[in-house]
Amino acid sequence: MVGNQIPHQILREVFGHSQFRNPQERVIETLMAGGNALVLMPTGGGKSLCYQIPALALPGTAVVVSPLIALMEDQVRALHQLGIPALALHSGLETVQQQCVEEKLAAGQLKLLYCAPERLLQERTLRILEQTGISLVAIDEAHCVSQWGHDFRPEYLRLHVLRRKFPSTPHVALTATADLQTQAEIMARLELSGAPVFSRSFDRPNIRYSVCRHGSPRESLLGFLRRQHPCSSGIVYCTSRKKVEETAAWLQLRGFPALPYHAGMNLAARQEHQRQFQQNDVPIMVATVAFGMGIDKPDVRFVAHMNLPKSLEAYYQETGRAGRDGLPADAWIHYGFQDIFQLRRRILESSHSHPARKVLDESRLQSMLDFCEEQGCRRQCLLSHFGEALEGNCRNCDNCLFPQDPWTATQAAQKAFSAIYRTGQKFGVRHLIEVLQGRQTPRILQLGHDRLSVYGIGSDIPASSWQALFRHLLAKSYILPHPEGHGGLVLDVSSRDILRGKTEICLGHEG
């Protein structure tokens, strides 16, 4: 039986690898000695081996908690190909199939049991586990325990029951993305206080990060695909089911084979689309952000976001699905003024939210916006968010490869603020730009805004530059959505420092 072999032999003879990656060996040693651990490793970094090898080396069955059926089935399928007895227990199984899994578990015939948290915490399942020799408990995608995180699963909040039921069994929590606050939340909620944290660099040097901030999202995506990925496999993320369907159809009409994937589709259709994508029958999957967590496809050459993600943690995890084979890949995102406006307004309008929740949501959004507005190395900005420093520029992001000429826009920002104030702090960006450029639109003439002192004071600046400036000012919270809606903008108190010349505004030319 494989379980009696030492970790290095299992690594070589079962998984076909000659050596461990950092920090796999230290994690395995900790678990083999009966200790607990929190493991932070990027997607494709080898997290699974951290619990799979101890599961084979220790007597008994390892229990792996996983949030998605697709993720569990994918892992089980891969283990079966290696001749390892593993099964999954979840709501997608028929009653007879569930009984078969339980019987094999009770008989000690499994080395690994993958289980959804809600099923695992049922009294029936816990009773069987208590009667079975449990070698370790692994909680995969552990960031799901973060109640205000980007991938929260309510059932994860009850997983501390496992520590109390099996106090002498080693526990390991694993995730590809967690800032310091989320790490602390994982440790507290899973009762892993005092456990060592093992981490690998969050840097994925093969991924090129690019942000597109002009043009329509679809036309910009089309240009990106034609220039860089005319025949590549990739994922396009959209925020809504409707946009998923429309974008997939739009790409198909333009010669890019694409399939939609979202929770509103029936299970058979989702599985068939996933199969075609996995087998490269159709190279592009257009999906909502849930797609990808359970997909082990190493040759995804690009991940494109058509809208602004809610946090840098979510963005990092989603882009991590590209280039898992270590070959060059792209993380491309399109965002603009309306993305920021809608997300900021949503936070302002979330009256039902706990005040601390609002603060956290705003903080996470700000980190995402800072990344998108970054004028220096984007990789430095991204890694800094996770507490990691990168010396020197990465030379593999859009800013490093194609630096923009700087534009000292402090005076233009002062004019923008004046336009917002003089028009009554209730108009949107399009009208404000038309006023600043001195346009004679029917609305401007009707409102008498052509008689304001700010009318035409920005006629020397092209509309594209004004749009970039307003987007930047909104991203940095110098201006905010009007609290009563209607698409208007108001000044934040922080704008005073710019009006008084105490703060400089500098950004790159985009138009």
Image: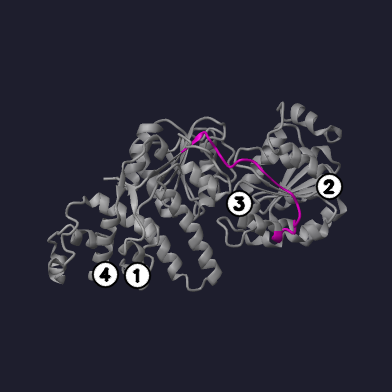
Residue flagged by tag 4: what amino acid is it?
Tyr
The kind of residue on which mark 2 rests is: Gly
Give the Cα separation between the discs numbered 1 and 4. Answer: 12 Å
The residue indicated by pointer 3 is 178
Residue 110 as seen in the image, left or right of residue 374: right
Inter-mark Cα distance, 2 to 3: 24 Å
Kind of residue at disc 3: Ala
**Of 308 and 286, the residue lying toward us:** 308
The kind of secondary structure element at disc 4 is: helix
| Whole-number angstrom distance, CA of label 1 to CA of label 3 | 33 Å
Residue bearing mark 4: 421
Q: Are marks 3 and 4 in contact (CB under 8 Å)?
A: no
Upstream in sequence: badge 1 or badge 3: 3
Q: Residue at x 22, y 62 (%)?
A: 431
Image spot of residue 131 (x, y percent): 87, 53
Question: Along the line of sight, which residue is nearer the eye, 125 or 395?
Answer: 395
Label 2 environment density (alpha carbons within 10 Å; few <14, some 14–19, many ≥20): some
Quarter of the image for the N terminus: give it. top right
Q: Can see residue 504?
A: yes
Which residue is tagged 1?
Answer: 482
| Location of the C terminus (image quadrant) | top left
Inspect the image, locate mark 1, and give the three-letter code of the amino acid beneath it.
His
The stretch of residues the image draws in magenta is 188-208
Q: Earlier in the sequence, mark 2 or mark 1?
A: 2
